[in-house]
Amino acid sequence: MARSRIFFEDSFMDAPDVIQKQVKRTNCYRANRITPDEKAEVIQILLKTLSSGSRGITKTPGVMVGEACIDKTRLPVWLFVSLREQGATDAELLKFYPHISAADLVNVWAYADAHPEEIVKIIRKN
């Protein structure tokens, strides 16, 4: 499962040379700092997320065959796990599904971590 990582320059520069070379070689290092416009955008997204709250994870008989979904949606947990396994980042998922919040994704990942056998079984079925 591929996940992108960003190392802030301050902490990255404290790492031993061997680690710095490996990180650069694996394209995990972002040389440019985040711009003020990007910071403002991130803050706006976070504020929107905090004000909207999260809905939790529910299983409703008759909705998505009773599978675990983000509350009041038809978006099953296994879908997000599958997309993440295919390389999607949280930022991409929030872009693809703008009506869910970052807090909803936190609930998705917590549920998936707590019920791995259930999620694997459903993904194999679908």
Image (cartoon, grey):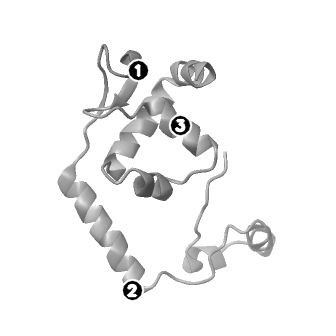
Question: Of marks 2 and 3, which one's residue comes earlier in the chain?
Answer: 2
Q: Is residue 101 above or below residue 115?
A: below
Residues at marks 2 and 1, CA–CA distance in whole angstroms: 41 Å
What amino acid does circle 2 point to? Pro
Question: Of marks 2 and 1, which one's residue comes earlier in the chain?
Answer: 2
Q: Position of 68 compared to 116: left or right?
A: left
**Label pair 3/1, CB-CB below 8 angstroms:** no
Residue 2 lies, in percent from the top left, at 66, 51
Instruction: Name the one closer to the observer, 124 or 113.
Output: 124
Report crowding for label 3: few under 14, some 14 to 19, many 20 or more residues within 10 A (C-alpha). Answer: many
Instruction: Name the one closer to the observer, 8 or 60.
Output: 60
**Label pair 2/1, CB-CB below 8 angstroms:** no
Residues at marks 2 and 3, CA–CA distance in whole angstroms: 32 Å
What amino acid does circle 3 point to? Val
Residue 107 lies, in percent from the top left, at 36, 38
In front: label 2 or label 1: 1
In front: label 2 or label 3: 3
Report crowding for label 1: few under 14, some 14 to 19, many 20 or more residues within 10 A (C-alpha). Answer: many
Residue 78 lies, in percent from the top left, at 50, 30
Which residue lies at the image location 34% right of the left edge and 54% below the top edge? 98
Q: Which mark is residue 36?
A: 2
**Residue receiving disc 3:** 81
**Residue receiving disc 1:** 67
Q: Position of 65 compared to 49: left or right?
A: right
Which residue lies at the image location 54% right of the left edge and 54% below the top edge? 89
Which residue lies at the image location 68% right of the left edge and 67% below the top edge? 28
Q: Is residue 36 above or below residue 116?
A: below
Q: Is residue 88 above or below residue 85?
A: below
Q: Secondary structure at mark 3?
A: helix
Which residue lies at the image location 63% right of the left edge and 22% below the top edge? 124
**Which image quadrant: the N terminus?**
top right
Question: Of marks 3 and 1, which one's residue comes earlier in the chain?
Answer: 1
